[in-house]
Amino acid sequence: MFLVTMSGFILKPSTMRQLCFQCIAARHCIGNTRSFAQQNVTSHRRLCSSTKSDAENQTKHDTETAESLLFNAGAFDIKDPQEFTDSEHSSEEEILYKDHIPTTLFQKSLLAVGSACMSLYDPYRADMIATLGETTGPLALRNIQQKMLADPEGRQILQEQPRINSSTVDMKYLAELPKGTFGREYIDFMTRNNITADSRTNVQFVDDPKLSYVMQRYREVHDLHHTLLGMPTTMLGEIAVKWFEMIQTGLPMCALGAVFGPLRLRSASKYEKLVRMYLPWAIRNATSARFLLNVYYEKRWEQSYEELRQELGLITFDEKKSYI
């Protein structure tokens, strides 16, 4: 798959993210360029006032250098040089949290289009899916945040901001829990599918620290959703989970996976299974179950797996049963 730019050049989707990062890097470098240019202008003025007769050539050279640098900076579509008089401070103020990359609306749009194309081409590109979620999800993230604030357990999660990775969760302890506990089911799922909790990247493009955590939380509990729903990481299982998450969260990236994921099914029998069993089951589960992002999973490791599923109102999937 390729993208065609307005200039007529053809770009591979795999290069879109790299190009966007280059644009962003250039944006941050512009402030330093302008600052350097202004220092040259100041330098030549001082030189003129002290040794005017001997410094005419140097003054002319410095002025041309400054003008050239300002012109080059203008090529990045920044029109007012005064905007970057104190560029270092303004850049620092834009960094809202660790790993945050400030982006304009245009840059977000470019990232969203490129990551969407690449996600459709290769649904296992976690980096592209992550970028798509961050650049298209602000409205949905606010709705999720409101749902969490309205629930005591969800509110505690937002206040304490727990993380799920090998540094914060004792995976060895989970592996030693008795069979039938939620923590043991989770670690067994991760082991079967060769997944690690550290594979979830940090949020970068959400321009709100609180909403960035909401996105991070969603990302880190995705495998817990798989565990609770009993869905494998096969294409059918991923599509079913995406339908569940789309209904519960409203995230556009989930909608993209839910709607376009079935196009990757290679056989009519799998498509029939999806329509007759997986989708009706996922829709029924999502609409009747408790909002899963309001579950403080770290406090539930020792709880019975089946007891937790019943508490959340989840329906067990039966492949021999039609849910239409």
Image (spheres, grey):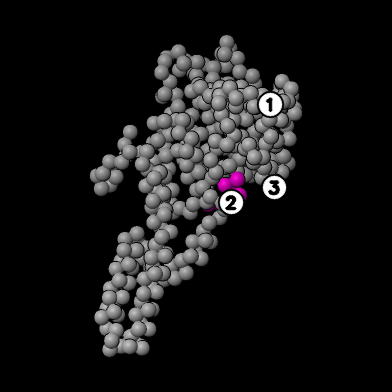
Q: Does residue 250 appear in this view?
A: no
- Which of the marked residues, 3 or 2, is nearer the chain's N terminus? 3
Q: Disc 1 on helix, strand or loop? A: helix
Q: Which residue is mark 3?
A: 159
Q: How many marks?
A: 3
Q: Which quadrant does the C terminus fall into?
A: top right
> Relative to the observer, which residue lies in front, 217 or 148?
217
- The residue range painted magenta reads 207-213
Q: Disc 3 on helix, strand or loop? A: helix
The mark found on residue 138 in the picture is: none
The mark found on residue 209 in the picture is: 2
Q: Amino acid at mark 1?
A: Ala
| Residue 135 horizontal/vertical position (percent) | 47, 45
Name the residue: 43% across, 43% down. 112
Q: Is residue 210 magenta?
A: yes
Q: Which residue is mark 1?
A: 175
- Which of the marked residues, 3 or 1, is nearer the chain's N terminus? 3
Q: Amino acid at mark 3?
A: Gln
Position of residue 242 relative to residue 39, above or below, is above
